[in-house]
Amino acid sequence: MTHSRRSVLRRGAGLAVAGAAASLAGCSGATGGGSEGFDSGYAAFFTLNDWANEVAGERASFEDPVDVGQLGHGWTPDGTLARDVAATDAFVYLDSPEFSWAQDLAETLESDYDTVAVIDGLDGLEDDLLDWDHTHGGEEGDHDGEDGGHEGDDHDGEGEEQDDDRQYDPHVWVDPVFAADIVDTIATGLGEADPDNADAYAANADAYAEELDAVDAAFQSIADEAARDVAVLAGHNSFQYLEARYGFRLHSPVGVSPQNEPTQSEIADTIDLVDTEGIDVVLYDRFQSPRLAESIVENSDATEAVPVTPAGGTTQEWNDAGYGYLEQMTEINVPAFERAFDAQ
């Protein structure tokens, strides 16, 4: 892998975010929140921020630097983020090239500040992550876990590759089982950084894991009750982990890479599939344009385009409704998958 296998909590050396070392040097002597007690941190994107706050409870507050409506991958922070994070007690991230800005920030914190707990949510999951085939159609139901299925960890559309020349899908958080593993890793990291409250963090993680168990059961019920063995996702596929966990099969004319553009032939094949399989609902990613889904609906026997969420970001509407990760999964994805697979 191009990135190191960090321990849950490291306080060692690394690379710097461009320009960050100089700005941090101007803050030398700053010790984050540690001198006044462990009470604050940052997390690299919406989902990790939600989980970190669930685990921390009333003992600490985490912030998400990514703007509402944006996803943490492919995002570029402003020049003050490193300084802001260094003034807190913890940074939670995923050590994946898809989040290269967070990798660089983690290295800077580990190198220059021994008071900021750097917690990698992927720690321990490196061997469970799926290959990411960037060719069109590479996502369709081949991830049953029987031939190494969950295999290693990466990413992206940025062209970086791992040591074994394979790329890996970082969207592990959409799988509620792996989500519970990451939540536990966050609790362990916070407990190491703040031992006085370690038991409380562990208890909060256990309570949240029970809610994730309910999400797992809901998806398993869809898989058990599905009258249709394939659904159409008109956008890039961020749901390979759900396919692998529950045996879902998602057909996408785009593939897994957000940089891919479907050909007219691929769109026509998708329309044929919709009509052949009697598919009523075409799914699309809420963070992408619905135009492709709407076009497929207009030119097929399908009747509706329905949004799903990769649960890596949020919208103002969802914020106003109080939606966290759990609500995005239970209020958006579970009903959409029920309809798409005719499991109602």
Image (cartoon, rainbow, N blue to C red):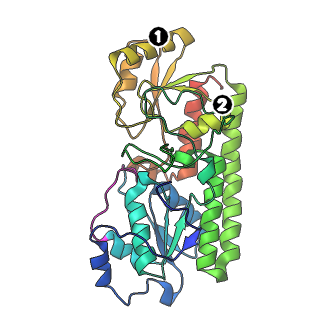
* Circle 1 SS class: helix
**Distance between the Cα atoms at labels 2 and 1?**
22 Å
Q: Which numbered tag is attached to residue 272?
A: 1
Q: Is-magenta flag for residue 247? A: no
Quarter of the image where the C terminus is located: top right
Q: Which residue is drawn at 45% across and 75% down?
A: 13
Q: Quadrant of residue 264?
A: top left
Q: Is residue 320 visible?
A: no
Q: Where is residue 97 in the image (x, y as percent from the top left)?
A: 43, 53
Q: Which residue is drawn at 54% across and 49% down?
A: 153
Q: Which residue is farthest front?
A: 164
What amino acid type is highlighted by mark number 1?
Answer: Asp
Percent of width and height locating residue 249: 59, 26
2 or 1: tag closer to the N-terminus: 2
Q: Identify the amino acid type marked 2.
A: Gly
Q: Residue 21 carries which label?
A: none
Quarter where residue 255 is shown: top left
Region rendered in magenta: 70-80
Q: Give the overall secondary structure of the magenta segment.
A: loop
Image mark for residue 247: 2
